[in-house]
C-alpha cells in the first residue's frame, strides 16, 4: 500500500507532503465536449437563451471551479493558482469543445484544477441549456498536457 502516494504504510488516507519539493512552474491543459442539438449550439452562439450569455457564465463557473478544486476532490492541496484560461469552440454543428489551461508556481501540479474547470464549465452549459435540450451529454473530459514537476511532461497522443 505504501507505493500509493495517498496512503500510508498502514493503508490510511493521507495528503501528500509536498514541503520538501521545489517550487516550479506548473501548467495543465484539459478538454471536454458537450454534445448538443445544432439548434442549441446556434442559440448559444447567438446569445439567444433566456438565461443569458451561456459561454461567459460557463467561463466564470469554470474559473471558480478550478479555484475550489481542493473543496471538491479529497486530498487535493489548496493551490495559489496564477491563471485559469477557458476557451470554447464549435468543431461541429452539434459539439461544443471546452478547453481549460491552469498555471501556477508551486510544489504540486494543476491537472485536477484544469479537469475540474472543464467539468464545471460543461455542467454550467448543461444547466443553462437544459430547458431547450435535455438530451445534451458531457463527454471526453481528459488531460491534454501538463508540464513541470518531478514526473515530467505529458502530452496526449492525437486520436
Image (cartoon, rainbow, N blue to C red):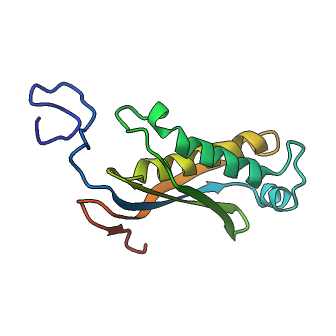
Front-lying residue, 69 or 98: 69
Of all residues, the one furthest to the bottom in this rendering is 158
Which of the 4 image quadrants contains residue 146? bottom left
Q: Residue at x 26, y 44 (%)?
A: 18
Which of the 4 image quadrants contains residue 151? bottom left
Q: Where is residue 134 in the image (x, y as percent from the top left)?
A: 73, 41
Looking at the rendered image, the quarter that the C terminus falls into is bottom left
Q: Where is residue 16 in the image (x, y as percent from the top left)?
A: 25, 38
Front-lying residue, 98 or 28: 28
Q: Where is residue 108 in the image (x, y as percent from the top left)?
A: 33, 50
Q: Residue at x 52, y 55 (%)?
A: 82
Front-lying residue, 127 or 14: 14
Front-lying residue, 139 or 61: 61
82 lies above or below 51: below
Determine if residue 156 is in view. Answer: yes
20 lies above or below 92: above
* 85 left or right, relative to 134: left
Q: Which residue is drawn at 39% across and 60% down?
A: 26
Determine if residue 135 is in view. Answer: no
Q: Residue at x 80, y 54 (%)?
A: 40
Looking at the rendered image, the quarter that the N terminus falls into is top left
Q: Position of residue 69 (x, y in %)?
A: 48, 39
6 lies above or below 141: above
Q: What is the number of callouts on the image?
A: 0
Amino acid at each position: 500500500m505504501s507505493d500509493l502516494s495517498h496512503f500510508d504504510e498502514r493503508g490510511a488516507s493521507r495528503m501528500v507532503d509536498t514541503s520538501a519539493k521545489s517550487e516550479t512552474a506548473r501548467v495543465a491543459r484539459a478538454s471536454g465536449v458537450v454534445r448538443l442539438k445544432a439548434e442549441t449550439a446556434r442559440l448559444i452562439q447567438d446569445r439567444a437563451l433566456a438565461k443569458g450569455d451561456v459561454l461567459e457564465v460557463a467561463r466564470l463557473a469554470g474559473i471558480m471551479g478550478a479555484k475550489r478544486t481542493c473543496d471538491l476532490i479529497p486530498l487535493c492541496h489548496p493551490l495559489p493558482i496564477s491563471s485559469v484560461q477557458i476557451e470554447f469552440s464549435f468543431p461541429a454543428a452539434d459539439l461544443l469543445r471546452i478547453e481549460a489551461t491552469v498555471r501556477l508556481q508551486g510544489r504540486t501540479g494543476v491537472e485536477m484544477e484544469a479537469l475540474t474547470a472543464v467539468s464545471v464549465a460543461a455542467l454550467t452549459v448543461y444547466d443553462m441549456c437544459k430547458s431547450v435540450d435535455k438530451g445534451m451529454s458531457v463527454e471526453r473530459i481528459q488531460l491534454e498536457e501538463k508540464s513541470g514537476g518531478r514526473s515530467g511532461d505529458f502530452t496526449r497522443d492525437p486520436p
